Every structure is written in structure tokens, then in C-alpha cells.
Amino acid sequence: MADVKKVKTPKEFFIDFMMGGVSAAVAKTSAAPIERIKLLIQNQDEMIKQGRLAEPYKGIADCFARTTRDEGVVSLWRGNTANVIRYFPTQALNFAFKDYFKALFGFKKQDGYWKWFAGNVASGGAAGAASLMFVYSLDYARTRLANDAKSAKGGGARQFNGLVDVYKKTLASDGLAGLYRGFVPSVVGIVVYRGLYFGVYDSLKPVVLVGALQGSFLASFLLGWGVTIGAGLASYPLDTIRRRMMMTSGAGVHYKSMFDAGSQIVAKEGVKSLFKGAGANILRGVAGAGVLSLYDKLQEVLFGKVYSGGMSICFVNRKLLLMGRWQALAKRACVDALERGSTRIGVSLPTGAGKTTVFISLLARLSSPTQAPDATRTLVIVNSVELARQTADQARRLFPQWTVEIEQGKHHASGLADLTIGTIQTLTRSQRLDKFRAQYLKAIIVDEAHHAAAPSYRHILSHFDTAIKNPDKGFEPPELTHRVPILGFSATFSRHDGLALGSVFEEIVYHKDFLEMIKDEWLCRVLFTTVHADIDLSGVTVNSNSGDFNPTSLGQVINTQPVNELIVRTWLDKGADRKSTLVFCVNLAHVAALTAAFRDAGVDARYLHSKTPAGERRTLIESFRAGEFPVLVNCAVLTEGADIPNIDCVIVARPTRSRNLFAQMIGRGMRLSPGTGKKDCRIIDFVDSEERVAGVVSTPTLFGLDPSELTDDESIESLEERRAAMAERAAEETELVTPGVTGNVPMPKSVTYIDHDDPFVLADQGSGDPSLWKITQNAWVSCGGGVYVLECMGKGYIRIRPIESDDEGAGDGDNTGATLIAHYTAPTLSKPTAWILKISPYRKSKKILTAATLADAIRGCDTYAQKEVLPGGVARGLSRNAKWRWEPATESQKKFVLKAWKGRKVVTTPNGLGKAIPATEEGLRTLKKGVAANMITRLKHGALKRYEKKRKAQVRSILATEKEARRRAREDVKVGRLAS
């Protein structure tokens, strides 16, 4: 898709017009005194010829002293009214036309630096020359008024009484030509001065104002002043000639041309006369610098433009200074990470936080690496056509001078643009990817980066960083001049299928939670309603890769007439007053059926899905954004990248086990949209009323509440209050079990410890940790000490344990900050087999992964077990609900457990510490194979030893607690008898 420079809209043109004029007026008024001193010194020889000045000025100080003495301080602003009137349209037209002429010349960086530079100079000069046609007479009047000094031979009388008098007398003596005397050298001078004034500034600011200097008012001011000084000195002789020609209007003798004027001045007064007042002109440059820097700052305050290489970034309201602060923190975190050597980093920002704005503005701050000076381009990888278009539009708005192209489907980018947005589907094709050469790329952005661990992404990214493993066999890593920085942005920086994002990214450098955003009012207020529906999810199959429900299987349970009618009734009750409701369904069939249910109830509901044609999809979304209909039903289309801020109600009509997906769905309604009257967003989700399946994400689980908790019209504040109350109750219950030293709760007469670390506890099938049931369906067991084991039905076992300092290569290619490591150990060989093979019967463990959380580790190991250890249907035997696990335990299992059970000690009450509880065969008759297998696995992996260690610590803790309770009891003063 070739880049086409956008033509300014009338509104944009008017804003540029006004901003340039206001900035110029303020800056020139502040510099009016030095401006008049400069003109008096510059034209003093012409004034002496005409008898308007008694003697030459000796310098700036002398001119200032004589003028204020003879005319007063206020006279230093003489001619400023004409100057403001003149400068307002001059600068306004310059700024307004500057981008027009820049687009007209249309030179790009890839055309060659000097050609691009020349285009900038020419555009600035043309803008100045064009504006001069309209305002030259005002410049003439300002010059004549400023040089109308009272310190003259003729008693100090004024030649002109004001602006109008200048026009009257000049027209009377010289006609219209008198007002335009000196116009030709002015045009020549303006090309030189304005060309450098704008061209050099625009050329240097993307080079100089980067890194720590970006956004600095002082740096922008000093750069502008330096450019003004250089441009002023280069064009100053032409300025002197034109003003000396202006001074001859109304006089008897005129210069014939600018060449005649120049030659006469040099011949009679010397070359230095052409530079009289140049020192004052340098001081006057402060005003010129002020024009440019105030232009940027006033745009920021009034029109939402923030300085970043001269480009606008985001809308500004009274709160956006804070918005800019945390966005700046995210960008700063990225820059810091890159400076310390990290090249693969992630940023976690919630939906509605402006990820696109952050990473586009970040790109303006990144410079080419020293080892690759030609690396000036950027590639952004997105996963949908909508995201590609949105990103391209935003980039063009923020940085209109960039060339922006799209690589997607029929749209073929050149590979030479400043910024290219490519879809993952297109870039996986070699012929489309090959045009993006690493030596020309300064950065790669991965949007929705939680997908980045997928093979398709690694296939692309491995071409730009050899640390990323390409999933294709036979892939030869390229020779790179530098590692291209890869920056990932996502609202949900984790993967539900257990694939480690550490295979792509080294670290997450910034995180902002959506709850924080809502509390700080950067996202809208949210009301939650959870509906308990009569649905049974226990029979729904789970995708082995994603860990979420299979849509087809889920659709059979959800896409029923009763459930769809319940969804519609709930919306009529809770959401009918909402303007824009977005509904998430299971699959295409559910989309059609639920849309029909809404329409049957008289609701104008429309739908879209992955097969909706692109043109129809755009029209539908635009109509929904415009509020033309109240309900839009979709399936897996608008979970990512949908910018529809007016959504004020979200219905999650598809249960999910993925926290990522749930957050993405509800996040669609959290954007602020005050312009549409949106005050808050209602979130409605549906859960299994019987809680027959663990791991389903809902509003209660999102806030750490029990999924059976009812939520209706709950705000974040009320949900957090409930969570705090629940935590307080839990703390009170814990206090009853193990009283703290500060509480007044009396010691109970008996305490029974139900400790899941005990390898002989039958609860939860002897898994040792009930929380495992919320993470996985497989029969993982806890062996204490942070060790978790999955027995692989005679094919060995997978073991997760905490990472130790001496683990070799624990962090290679995995999550930075990982705390757990997993290994797979094949089954021990029989001694005869080992003897024949002449190898050890004990197999060496193979490292599988490292992870930051237990959930990530287990999900990753489940994926490994199902693909590498027990592929196919055999993997079903790993489930805790496998049929074989409910059969009676074998005799050998019972004997093994009984032997380990003998002499076991448990903590029961403070009065019965260490009491031995013998086991009997009678107590083992009801033991099932699965429970026995779990016990044996835990015993083999050290659970009993760890439990005994913990038991001793518990005994010491209880004794210490009793001792402290007695001491505190002695300190209590009570009315009554004292113990003897």
C-alpha cells in the first residue's frame, strides 16, 4: 500500500493558522524593544542622510539609552502594533503552508538525505515567500514607524502619527509602489532566511531532539534560537538592503534596484554597514526561537499536541498530564531496558490505555544503533486487518511526515517506509517477509504480544534475533549486524496454554493493571452482574493446546433456546437502557441464534464474525460506533484491537477458562467516551450454577472471590470490600486454629489440623494441594516443599520444583524472573535390560521448562506430557477422573502404603502432640487405585520427610504460642481472686 500524504482538513488548517499567529504575536511583542533598537542601528545611515538623526549610534547600549531618554520606555514598542498585525498572518500562513509545501515537494528520507533536506529548505522558503505577498506593506509600515525617531535634528518631531498615517503619506508621495519598495530583495532574503529557519529546524529536530532531549522546552528553544541566529546572519545583508530601500519612499532619491542599493552602501559605507544591528538581531533571535517552541507548547495545552519531534501524540485534557506521566513511565522503562542491553522486552498495559499511541511515540525516541546507522525503519506486527488499519491511521495522525505502509493480503509494502504494519498471516510467507532486512530495522513492535510464543510469530522473529528459536526444522539463523530490538505490547501478557513467552521476550519492563486504571479514572467506571445459569459444563471438552473449552463442545451446552432466552431477558432487565451493547458468543451458530433471540424480543441486534466481508465489517462497526443500533453480537472478532469507546455494556455469553480472554472481552467496554454521554459500563457474565467444573473465569474469580458469590450491580470498590471482608474472615479462622500473640481470642480446647502436606490425607484424592484442581484436570500431586509430580502411567514422571542457584541454564530462553523448573524422567530400566545395553538403569532427567508461576509450569508440562510422553488418546489416563483411578487399590499398593504409614505421627491437639496413630488393613480396604497411586508418588518423592520436618516446626510454633498466651494471661488484670 503506497503511502499518500494526507491533505489538511479545514479544521487542521485553521488550527495551524491560529497557533502560528498566536505564538508569533506573543513572541514578537516580548522582543519588540530589541527589534526597534536593531532597526534604528541598521538604518541609521539612511536616517542621517534624510536629516532624521543627529549623530550615529555607538552601539546597542547607546541606542537604547538615547531612545529611552528622548522618547521614553514605552517608545521601544513603537511600530509593534503593525508588527503584530503583520506577524500574525505572516507566521500563521508560514506554519499553515509549511506542511503543504513539504507535501508538495514530497521528498522522503529513502530518496536520499540531501534531497530530503533540500525539500525541507525549499518548502520553508516557499511558505515564507508566499505569505510575503500578503503582508509586505505592513512590514514596510512597521519599519518606517520604528525608524521615526524623535532624536532628530529638526527638534524631535515625528514624521508619522501612526500606522494609517504611514499608508496615507506613502501612497500620496509614491503610490502603491512605495509600499512595496525593497520587495525583490525581501523575496530573495525570505527564501534564504525562512528556508533555513524552517528547513534546518525541521531537519535537525528529529536528529537532535531525541532521547533525554525529546519533549524538552529548553532544548527546543535553544535549537530554535541557534537556527534563527544562523539564518539571520546568512540573510542579514539582504535584510539591510531591503530596509534601506524602504527608507527611500517619500524621499527624492531612490535606489534603482537591490544591486544598486548594495553597491552604493558598500562603496560609501563599507561592507560592515550591511551588518549593522546584527548583534541586536542575534538577541532578537530569542523571539524567533520562541515562535517555534511556543508553537509546540500551545498546541500541547490547547489542542492536545505533545512535542515529540514536532508531532502530536494524544488528546490532552485536565487529566492527561497524569496520563502522559504513566505513558512516559512505560516508554522510559523501555528505553532504560534497551540501554542496559535488553533487546526483547514486553509492556503490559490494559485495554484502553493507549498501547498504540505509546509504542508509536516510543519509536520516535529510538535512534539507529551505532553498528547499523542505516537502521531507521520499523516493522509493527499485528494479528488482524482492523489493527493494521488502526495502527497506520494513528501513526499518520501522530507523525504526518513519516511514510507509513501496510503489508497485508493484496496490499504490498515497499519495505522502505519509515513504518510498516504487517499482519502475522501475511508475514509468515517468505516472499513477503524477505523485503524487511534486519540491517535497516531499528525496532520491531509486536502488538497483542501474548501471541508471540506461537510458532508463526517465532518463525518471523527468529529472522531478526538469533536468540529466538525458529520452529521450522532446517532453519539457518541469519548473520545479523545487530539484534533488532523486539518490543511486545499487550493487555494480557500471559498465555493460557502454558507456552512460555520467555521463548521470545526477556523481561516485562512495565505493567499497569486495569483495576488501577479504573480507580484512577483513566478507564470508565464498571458495574458487574453475574448470572448463575442452569448449564452443565462438566461434559465440555477442553482444548489441549489452549486449555480453554472447545467451541463446538461448549456451543452444544450454551447455544440452547433456554440459555439464549435467559441472556436476552437479563439484558432487557439490566441492559435495555444501554446505548451500545457488545455480546461475545461461542461460535458462528451461537452468533446467529442469539441474534435471532434478540430480534424476536424486538431488539435491533446485528452480528459479525470472522467470515463477514471486510467492507461489510467496517460499515457495521462504524454504524455501531455511531450508535445506529443497540446490540452487536460477535464471535472471536472484537476481542482484540477494537476501538469502539462508546460500548457501555458487555455480555460475556461464552464461559471461558482463560483469564486472558475474559479480560479482553470485558476490556472492550472500559474505554472512556464522555462525548457519547457514557458514564459507566455494565459487565454481564454467565456461570454454571452448580460449579461442576473448576477453573472457569468469572467476575467473582477475577476478584479472588468464591465463584458461587452472587454479584449484581457491583462496582470494583464493592467487590474489593467483599474480598477484604473474606480475607478478614479467613484470618479470623486461621487465628482460631493458630492464635496470634496479639489477639484476645481464647485458646480452643481442641485443634484438629487438616494438613494437605500430610501424604496420607485422603481429601482431594490425596493430591496434597486442592488448588491443583483449579489449574489442571490431570492427577498432579504436591510432595511438599514446592515439589509437584505427575506420574505418567509407567512412562516416567514429570517433576516441578523451585529453581536453585546451581541449576545449570535454568533461565536460557525462558521467563526472566522464573521461580520453578520442570524435568521429565523416563522410567528406570530393568537390570537385565540395562546390562545388555551396557547403560545405567537410571535415566537422566530432561529439562522441560522454567516458569514464573505454578499455573504456567503445570500447563506447560501438561502440554509436554500430551505431546511427547503420552501422545494421542493415551493421555486421557492422566486425568484425575480416569476410570482406572476409581478401581480398588491393589494388594501391593496397600502394602506399600501400610509400611510407610506405620509409626506415623500427626499433630492433633496441644495436649496430644506427637501422638502416634497406627494404621490397619481395615482402614485401607476402601482405598482406590488413584488415591493409592497419589500416596505412593508423594512418598517416593519425599513428601513424608518434608511433612515430618514441617510437623516438628508446627509443634514448636504451638508450644511457643501456648507459652505466649500464658504470659499474656498473667498480664491481664481482672477483678477477683489471684492465683496463689
Image: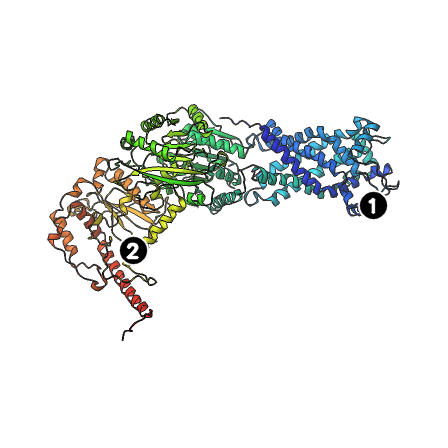
Percent coordinates x, y for residue 313 in the rendering: 53, 38
> What residue is shown with label 2?
733
Q: Given this view, does label 1 or label 2 mark the residue nearer the observer?
A: 2
Residue 962 visible in the snapshot? yes
Q: Horizontal placement of 242 versus 628: left or right?
A: right
Q: Residue placed at 19% from the left, 59% from the top?
A: 905
Q: Quadrant of residue 156?
A: top right
Q: Residue 195 in magenta?
A: no
Q: Amino acid at mark 1?
A: Asp
In depth, the one of 886 and 680 nearer the eye is 680
Query: Which badge, 1 or 2, is on the more N-terminal residue?
Result: 1
Could you tell me how far apart the alpha carbons at marks 1 and 2 are, in whole angstroms? 91 Å
Circle 1 SS class: helix
Q: Main secondary structure of the magenta part?
A: loop
Q: Residue placed at 55% from the left, 31% from the top?
A: 110
Write down the region rendered in magenta. 304-312
Q: Which dot marks residue 972? A: none
Q: Horizontal placement of 568 versus 37: left or right?
A: left
Label 1 CA crowd tier, 10 Å (few <14, some 14–19, many 20+) = some
Q: Amino acid at mark 2?
A: Glu
Percent coordinates x, y for residue 253 in the rendering: 86, 30
In depth, the one of 833 and 613 nearer the eye is 613
> What residue is shown with label 1?
70
Label 2 CA crowd tier, 10 Å (few <14, some 14–19, many 20+) = few
